[in-house]
Amino acid sequence: MTIRLILVLLLPLVLYGQENTNQSKFRQLGQELPTPNTYRTASGAPGHEYWQQQVDYKMEIEIDDDKQKLYGFEQVTYYNNSPDALSYLWLQLDQNVRALDSDSYKISSSSFGEKVSTRELKRLTPSFDGGFKIESVTSQTDAPLDYIINKTMLRIDLPQVLEPGQSFTFNIKWWYNINDRMQIGGRSGYEYFEEDENYLYTIAQYFPRLCMYNDVYGWQNKQFLGRGEFTLEFGDYQVSITVPSDHLVASTGVLQNPEDVLSADQRSKLKEAEEEYEEPVIIHSQKDAERAEKSKATTKKTWVFHAENVRDFAFATSRKFIWDAMAVEQEDGTKVMAMSMYPKEGNPLWERYSTKAVAHTLKWYSHYTFPYPYPVAWSINAARIGMEYPMICFNYGRTEEDGTYSMRTKYGVISVIIHEVGHNYFPMIVNSDERQWTWMDEGLNTFLQFLSEQEWARNYPSRRGPAHKIVDYMKGDKSRISPIMTNSESIHQFGNNAYGKPATALNILRESVMGRDLFDFSFKTYANRWMFKHPTPADFFRTMEDASAVDLDWFWRGWFYTNDHCDIALDNVTYLAPNTYNPEIEKEQSDLLDITTLRNKTAIKQTQEEIDNDLIDFYSTYDPKKVYDFERTEYKQKTSTLSPEVKEFIGSKEHYYQLDLSNIGGLVMPVIIRMKYEDGSTEDLRIPAEIWKMGTSTVSKIIVSDKPISNFELDPYLETADTDRSNNFYPPKQAKSKFEIYEQRRGGGKNLMQKTNKK
C-alpha cells in the first residue's frame, strides 16, 4: 500500500525565532555537556591522554562469630597515574553511615502511621554502635601518618607530595561491629537464624577504600548518606579471610588455597563442575549444611582469595551454606564458573534456579556488551537484600516452610539474580560514578535485565522496561518527579527515576527511535569503549550518537533533563478530496443529504416559495437535467486545455486525510499511527520525532491513500509511554473501565503451589 504524507505546519514567524534560539526541544546539548578534551572526546570515546588511578590491596580479615565483629588490616598501594601532584589521599569510610554521630540519622525524615514496626522504631535513633574503629594509619615502614576523619571520609596527609607516575604504600588497622541487617538494615551485615542459632554474613564496604580521583571531578568527595552508592578505582586484591572452620566462604576473586579449606570430596566435585555445562553440580549438599548447623566448630580456617583488576571486594560466609556450581562457555571460548551458596531456607527454589540464572545472565549480558572477563560469578542468598559487587552478589528470596513458593517469589528470585549479576557489567566493569549518577548503573542494568528476562521465558512478567509500565509514574505529580539527571541523594521516587524510567527510555530508543540494529551496535560500542574505565553521562550520550549517526540530543533532553511526559493527542481527522469540476462526480457527492435536510422534508409543511408564488423565478423551476448537460459541456471545454499532470490528479481516486495532532505532555516523541482501511486491512505509519522540530505543540499531517481509511490510532503498540490513550483514536473511542465482583471471605493467603498441592 502506498502512503504519501504532506506536512501542514502553521507557526508564527516570531514564535519560531524565539523557540529556535531559547526553547526548542531540538536544540543541541551544548552547555549541558562538558567541553571535549584530550581525556574525553566529542565522539564519546576516551581521549588519547585518558588516565585513571590504580589501587592495590593486601588484606587480612577475621570474623568473630561469637561477638559479630570484623577485624581488619590492609596494606594499600596507590598509583598516581594522573598528571597532577597529590598532597593527600581521600578514602571512603562507608561503615560510618551507621556511626552514632552519622548524618544519615539527622537528615532522614520520618513520620508515624497508625502502625509502626519495631524495625522502623530502631531506625529513628542511633542505638547501634556502628562505624569503623580506626586503630592506626601508618606508612610502609610503620611510621604514623597524619589523618583526619570527616564523617564517611578519611583524609591521609602524605609525608611528601606524590608526583605523577609515583606510588605510595600505607597501612590501616581497624575493626567494627557487624550490623544486624534484619533489624537495622544495610547493604551488608549478618542475618541471625534463631532456630539453629547460626549466622549468615554478607560482608561488603568493610574496609577503608580509596575514593576515585579523575579528570572530571578531581576527588570524588561526596559523603555517603546511604543511597548514592560507590565510586572506586580498579586494582588487584590479595585477601585472607579467617572464619570458623566449618564455614564456607564465597568471595570476589579466585580461591588460592583449596587444599587448606576444602575437603577432598569438595575439591573433586568442584573439578567436576568445571566441566559441567548443563546442570549445576552440588558441591556441598543440604544434608552437609544441616550437619554443620548442629555441630559448631571451635577452630578457624583462613581462606585466601586473589582478584585482578576489580574495583571492590566482597564476601559471604556461613556454616549454613549449600554450594552448587556449573561452567559457562562464552562466545569467545573463555570459561566462567557460575556458582551459588544458599541456606536450606532457600530450597528447593535456589537449587533449581539460582546458578542457571547466573549462567543465563552471563550469556545475554555478554551478547549485548562484551564477554564476561572474570573467572567466577557468585549468587548468594540473603533475605531482604539485592546488592552487587565484583564477581559476587547478595540476593533475596526464600520459600515457605513446606518448600512451596508463589509465582511472585519465583520470578522475583530470577529477576534479582539477573539484575545483581548483571551489575558486574554496569558499574563493576563499565565503572560509572554511582555516587553522582545512579541511573548510569541501575538504569542501564535494568534495561539489560529486561532483555535477559524476555530471553528466559515467553511472556516473562518483567516489572520494568516496556513503555506502558512507566505511564503511571510519568503522568503523576510533577513536584514529586525528578529529572533523571538528578544526584542520587535528591531523587524523588528513587526506583522509578533511577531504574524504571531510564530502562524504559533505552527500550524506546531501541524499538521506536533508532531500531534494534543501530541501537545494539551503539550500546555495545559504549560498553567496549568504557569497560574498566570511568564514563560520564556525556560519554554515553555522545557514543550512542557517534556510533549510529542519529542525532539524539532531543531525546536526552526530554527524557533525561526534564520531567515532561508523553501525551500526543489525535484532535481531529478531516477527509479531503480535490474538486474535480466533473458534474458526474460532484453530483454523486451532492446527492448526500445532511441530517437537517432529511428531517426538514417532513418537518417543514410549506416553504415560503410554496406559499408565495411571486417568489418563484428561473432558478426556482429550472430543469436539473438541462443544467447538468450544460455543466458537463462546460467541464469538457475546460479540461481540454489542462496539462496531463493536472488531469492525472483531478482524475485520481486517492483519498486525503488531514490529521491534527497536539503534544499535550511536552515530551517530543515519534508519532506512530495505525490506519484501518474500510476493507478491514491495517497499515502502520511511523513519523520521526522531528515532526515537532519547529517547537510548536500542534502540527497537522496529511495522509494520502489509494484506499478509504475508516479508523486511526496513535501508539497502537504501547511504545511511547503515552499517558492518556483516550485521545489516541479517531473516531473517538469510548473509554472502558472495569470493576471486579467478589464474595468477601476470611482466610486464604496460600500460594498456587499450596492450593494445587504441587511442587
Image (cartoon, rainbow, N blue to C red):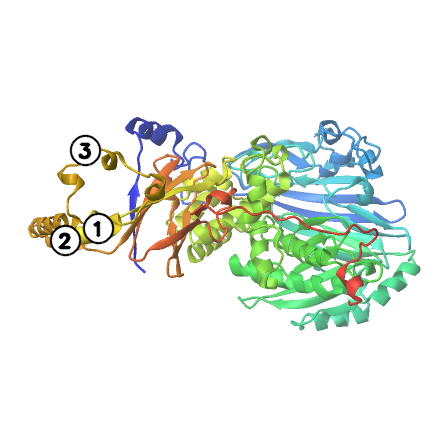
Q: Which residue is mark 2?
A: 647
The residue under the point 91% across, 58% down is 297
Q: Is residue 341 above or below residue 615?
A: below
Q: Is residue 506 left or right of residue 401?
A: left
* Amino acid at circle 2: Lys
Classify mark 3: helix, strand or loop.
helix
The residue under the point 62% across, 49% down is 738
Viewer can see residue 430: no
The picture places residue 107, in percent across and down from the top left corner, at 71, 28
Q: Which mark is residue 587?
A: 1
Q: Nearer the viewer, mark 3 or mark 1?
A: 3
For the residues labelled 3 and 2, the Cα–Cα distance comes to 41 Å
For the residues labelled 1 and 2, the Cα–Cα distance comes to 19 Å
Which image quarter: residue 113? top right
Q: Is residue 366 above or below residue 438?
A: below
* Amino acid at circle 3: Leu
Q: Is residue 78 left or right of residue 684?
A: right
Classify mark 1: helix, strand or loop.
helix
* Amino acid at circle 1: Lys
Viewer can see residue 709: yes
- Assess whether mark 2 and mark 3 are in contact (beta carbons under 8 angstroms): no
Q: Nearer the viewer, mark 3 or mark 2?
A: 3
Q: Nearer the viewer, residue 273 or 444?
A: 444
The residue under the point 73% across, 42% down is 207
Who comes first in sequence, dot 3 or dot 2? Answer: 3
Q: Which residue is mark 3?
A: 615
